[in-house]
Amino acid sequence: MAKTIARASSCRLRREFHLNSMHKPGDVVLGGLFEVHFSSVFPEITFTAEPPQPTCQGFDVLGFRNAQTMAFAVDEINRNANLLPNVTLGYSLYDNCGALVIGFSAALSLASGREEQFMFEKTCFGNPPVLGIVGDSYSTFSIATSNVVGLYKLPMVSYFATCSCLSNRQRFPSFFRTIPSDAFQVRAVIQILKHFAWTWVGLLVSDDDYGLHVARSFQSDLVQSGTGCLAYTEVLPWGNDPNELRRIVDVMKKSTARVIIVFSHEIHMINVIEEVIKQNVTGLQWMASEAWTASTVLQTPHYMTFLGGTLGIAIRRGEILGLRDFLLKTNPDGDQHSSSGNSMVKQFWEHTFQCRFAPPPAGWVDAGGALCTGQEDLSKIETEILDLSNLRPEYNVYKAVYALAYALHDLLQCVPGRGPFSRNSCANLQRLEPWQLVHYLEKVNFTTSFGDQVSFDEYGDSSPIYDVMNWAWLPDGRIKVQNVGVVKESASAGEELTLEEDKIFWNFESGKPPRSVCSESCPPGTRMARKKGMPVCCFDCIPCSEGKISNETDSMECTSCPEDFWSNTQRTNCVPKRTEFLSYYEPLGICLTTASLLGTFICAIVLGIFIHHRSTPMVRANNSELSFLLLLSLKLCFLCSLLFIGRPQLWTCQLRHAAFGISFVLCISCILVKTMVVLAVFKASKPGGGTTLKWFGVIQQRGTVLVLTSIQAAICIAWLVSSSPAPHKNTKYHNDKIVYECAVGSTFGFAVLLGYIGLLAILSFLLAFMARNLPDNFNEAKLITFSMLIFCAVWVAFVPAYVNSPGKYADAVEVFAILASSFGLLVALFGPKCYIILLRPERNTKKAIMGRDNKTEK
């Protein structure tokens, strides 16, 4: 084997790739990959010695201008005495023809060189064929190329590949770009959606790395931002598939989303819009990615009926001084820009002047027509290549070339012994390695003549900035793609969107931005409830329940009002709850207050009558001292009811039940003692019963009343000390209002107080009932029996009524029970006596009373 190698002095390339290209020699050569043709046709595979070459079709003037911009940048750098002095840059530019296999072949040719023979005797040291590559235009092409050349750390600086996947430094360690990645483009589009409140949008993407990565990134960022939802996501086919395009447009037509975002190349958009025109789908707002925002192919009257008003993200526009003069000097014969290989220029010449060179170069189609002389005047023909008012990809190409040049310049300025490499060594031009240039490219930082700063972050991405473009259809029929804003990213504020809305052309009758929402916004007072099986942007608006509010549009939840507040009717604000208590100013309170004061007044009148007629037999015969004390206690009973009316205070809550309990015990004690005195007198009138009266003298009567009342006072004091009643805000009965009431504190204490009153009342009733049939001169027992019957009936009915009465009505029931029982005692005990005293004075005599007694005895 060694002998065989020794006999062969060189080897030859097995196959030569015939690629459209432009070349210029130099001390250092930079490579370039551009789309000078839209597409290519691959012939059928044959097993011949020389397989047929693919044919490039559809000349792209703008792609050629990109290539010429790189040639201009190299020429400008060579003329700059301050940048790369004593070093001449050259270039090798290739056409990828819109095909991955051609672009990949061109990249391999750049990386390996174009020499046909390699001598084994030569050393392996020396400069690589190219030191860096500008390109490629497609993300997919850049991924494939960078996967290979990245293994050798050959730097690639793309001017148009935006896939965010290319920011992966582990996979693509030597890839850089002067165009923002799709990650920023996606965030920029989301900022526009947010600005116009478009929350329901459709997404169309191309079937390649660019489109598929954008789709994943867009869906993820849209969810994280909370800006909106995707109504649908459709992948556009590469070829013209009528059935698939018809299905996609049918989805667009049936969807309620009015905004369509398209991340694809212009060839995909042409196919889609043709189908949209066939189905006459109008009323859509298109949003363009940077890949087709500036596409002149789509900016025709035929398409503008549907695409007018399109908003798009565009690459930052720049100005390149001297480029026009450089382009005007383009010539296929002896072109001063390229010393060898000018097939691209010849194809441009044929396309522009509609002529042909003979014979046709390999790799392109003979268009027929007149022969080209090469002396045609480019300045006298209207061509798109000279329209430099909208330099966007070209500006990125210009920055990419200068980035490589500045990196190389910094590399050559290295001071020996202070270098960044092992043992502080520097790189040198004779033995330059691509990875050494990558090191300097990562740190490059310069400002263009247009004033933009160029540098790369740790992912190889340049500072992100985009122009916002709008496709305006002017009244005179002209089409204008105008700049209406800027999206840029700052370290402090993130993405910043600036729009001049008054300049935006809207392709709608209203002349205003469209509405594109799945569900209309939920007004204040409602909350969003997601529709089952639908995205979060599709929801129903549910009114907030009582006691909860939402004071913002599209509230996710209703907020509960504070304890002392309640929601208004619209459920938009919390308002103070209405307070409710038994007031002096409401009809019920007025009636009860009037009844209380009336009872007090009647008691005072009766007391006055009894005092005035205190010497009469009727007053004296019925224990006048206890009667006066009874009237006084009844007056206290009437007055204590007033403590239950009005806003509860601490002192009224503590006093009301104590006053009520002591007043009624005093009253019932007087009645009980009167009943016992009646029984004692009757028993004393019988033989052998005279000693009974000594136990019921005046002192004993007073003492009994005092002792019985003191017991109730002790109960009240113990209750107040242990668990005192206090004002309480009760929301149990009504959610929308506060019931002010007095909490009893200790239910046991309240029960003992009422039980003690009930015990005395029952005892009085039983004793009076036993004495009801006594002789007439003792028949006050009948009045006591009747009064106690009324009293017990009222308070027996009070208990269930009190328990089942809410809020202020519980106080009203208690006041009513106090007044009813007090009036019952007053009328039953003193009504007949006042009747006799005032209206039948003839019966208010001792004789009359005794006469009745005698009559009874007969």
Image: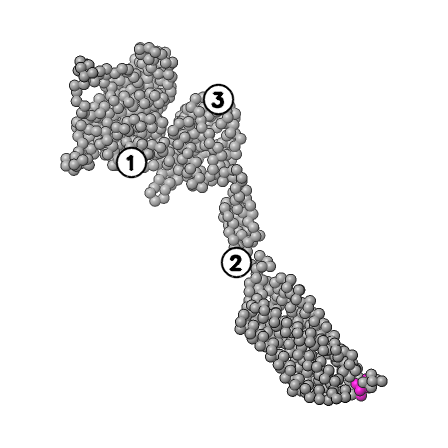
Q: Secondary structure at mark 3?
A: helix
Q: Is residue 466 above or below residue 7?
A: below
Q: Name the foreground residue: 184 vs 640.
A: 640
From the image, tell me which residue sits under label 3. 242
Q: Amino acid at mark 2?
A: Glu
Q: Is residue 717 above or below residue 549?
A: below
Q: Name the foreground residue: 209 vs 779.
A: 779
- The residue carrying pointer 3 sits among few (fewer than 14), some (14 to 19) or many (20 or more) residues within 10 Å by Cα, namely few
State the image coordinates of residue 666 (x, y, percent, origin top left): 64, 78
Q: Secondary structure at mark 1?
A: loop
Q: Nearer the viewer, mark 1 or mark 2?
A: 2
Residue occupying image coordinates x 44% and y 26%: 236
Q: Quadrant of residue 752?
A: bottom right
Residue occupying image coordinates x 50% and y 30%: 252
Q: Quadrant of residue 172?
A: top left
Q: Earlier in the sequence, mark 3 or mark 2?
A: 3
State the image coordinates of residue 565 (x, y, percent, origin top left): 53, 57
State the image coordinates of residue 402 (x, y, percent, origin top left): 26, 31
Q: Is residue 850 magenta?
A: yes
- The residue carrying pointer 2 sits among few (fewer than 14), some (14 to 19) or many (20 or more) residues within 10 Å by Cα, namely few
Q: Amino acid at mark 3?
A: Pro
From the image, tell me which residue sits under label 2. 563
Residue extent of the magenta highlight = 847-852
Q: Which quadrant of the rendered structure holds the C terminus?
A: bottom right
Distance of mark 1 from mark 2, alpha carbons? Answer: 58 Å
Q: Quadrant of residue 115?
A: top left
Distance of mark 3 from mark 1, alpha carbons? Answer: 43 Å
Q: Earlier in the sequence, mark 1 or mark 2?
A: 1
Q: Name the foreground residue: 765 vs 222.
A: 765
Q: Name the foreground residue: 208 vs 482.
A: 208
Is residue 545 found left or right of 30 in the rendered image?
right
